[in-house]
Amino acid sequence: MHLLKSTAHDHPIASEITPPDVYQQRRRWMQTLAAGAAGAAASALPWQAQAQTPRPGKLAALAGDKSAVPGAQVMDKLTPYADITSYNNYYEFGTDKADPARTAGSLKTRPWTVAIEGEVRKPGIWDLDALLKLAPMEERIYRLRCVEGWSMVIPWVGYSLAELIKRVEPTGNAKFVQFVTLANKAQMPGLSSGSLDWPYVEGLRMDEAMHPLTLLAFGLYGEVLPNQSGAPVRAVLPWKYGFKSGKSIVKIRFVEKQPKTSWESANAQEYGFYSNVNPKVDHPRWSQATERRIGEDGLFAKKRPTLMFNGYEAQVGQLYAGMDLKKLY
Ligand SMILES: Nc1nc2c(c(=O)[nH]1)N[C@H]1C(S)=C(S)[C@@H](COP(=O)(O)O)O[C@H]1N2
Ligand SMILES: [Mo]
């Protein structure tokens, strides 16, 4: 795992001494061998063999129209549903990419509430059903770029987080938002490992949170989010590395000071508060100049160049005008 917290006493793990793509490729071959011919059909990648959980299905509220928000309809080929839902980072359910699809069945997504706290005139507890009705659902096709060097193209269903923020009326002291996600030992096997400090927390500056591209997602491919994708409600920040997009949110806090995030707490040298996708600022342990598109990553597939702000520079570049993006990584 590239992202795992490492201390001076740790032995180097395979992913740290091998370039990420070589490591992934080798790992996949080993999985293919382990799965045997039956588990690995010619077109299916090994982890797909395990993704047999039933799809959660439609919800009337999720019949969303295509979003008209500028930048919300990326024209790249969609990543297949099977890949999106079987190659996941959701450490509460284990650190292996295949773990969440296998173990997230234990997540209870109803009843579900999201608490709104802090610097707002209307704090309170929102039931999921109220959130589902808060604003019209839209389909948005976003690129998702993980800091590890892979990407996907995902048709989300949801609405701008700004819709919720406007309704809770932030005060003038609200400069940042913090997302707190579920931490439930009985439901989440990964919590007993020390891979991160729980709950998983993330944060945004207020103008980032209010940007129309910032999505509160409830579904993908027109269906309810499967648990491994962050059910029942998650954030999606398409111009930031994937870890900024917290899954299974239970609380949104409006605060005056820049909040702590789990990845900064784990390793501040490697994971900054902003974490905007930037091909010119490398991760200390690997380049960020290119990426592997999941679903088209056969042995001979070419890597793609990573785009500034993941291709959303026209929409979000202004938010960072005048900032030194090498320092505020
Ligand atoms: N609560 C929680 N949210 C999380 C994570 C996590 O481990 N826990 N992983 C993050 C990372 S590193 C990525 S790349 C994306 C992955 O989203 P996906 O599995 O839907 O592609 O979720 C992010 N949100
Ligand atoms: Mo990630």
Image: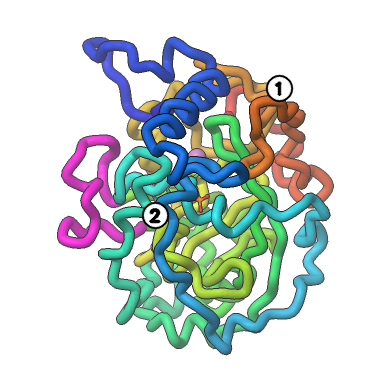
Instruction: Answer whether residue 258 is visible to the viewer in this image.
Output: no
Tell me how many marks there are: 2
Residue at 81% of width from left, 71% of height from top? 68
> Which disc number belongs to residue 236?
none
The secondary element bearing badge 2 is classed as: helix
Residue at 38% of width from left, 83% of height from top? 127
The amino acid on which the numbered mark 1 sits, given as a three-letter code, is: Lys
Residues at marks 1 and 2, CA–CA distance in whole angstroms: 33 Å
Numbered range of the magenta stretch: 181-199
Closer to the camera in the image, 171 or 23: 23
Q: Residue furthest front?
A: 37
The amino acid on which the numbered mark 2 sits, given as a three-letter code, is: Ala
Q: Is residue 204 above or below residue 215?
A: above
Whether residue 141 is in magenta: the answer is: no
The secondary element bearing badge 1 is classed as: loop
Q: Predominant secondary structure in magenta?
A: loop
Residue 98 location, x and y as percent?
A: 40, 45
To which residue does mark 2 refer? 101
Residue 289 location, x and y as percent?
A: 70, 23
To which residue does mark 1 refer? 280
Ligand 2 within 8 Å, label 1 CB: no
Residue 22 location, x and y as percent?
A: 55, 18
First in residue order: circle 1 vs circle 2: 2
Q: Is residue 174 above or below residue 125?
A: above
Task: Assign the N terminus to one quadrant of the image.
Answer: top left
Crowding around mark 1 (Cα neighbors within 10 Å: few <14, some 14 to 19, many 20+) is some
Whether residue 193 is in magenta: the answer is: yes
Q: Is residue 98 above or below residue 285?
A: below
Task: Assign the C terminus to one quadrant of the image.
Answer: top right
Scheme of image coloration: rainbow
> Which of labels 1 and 2 is toward the front?
2
- Quarter of the view holding residue 300: top right
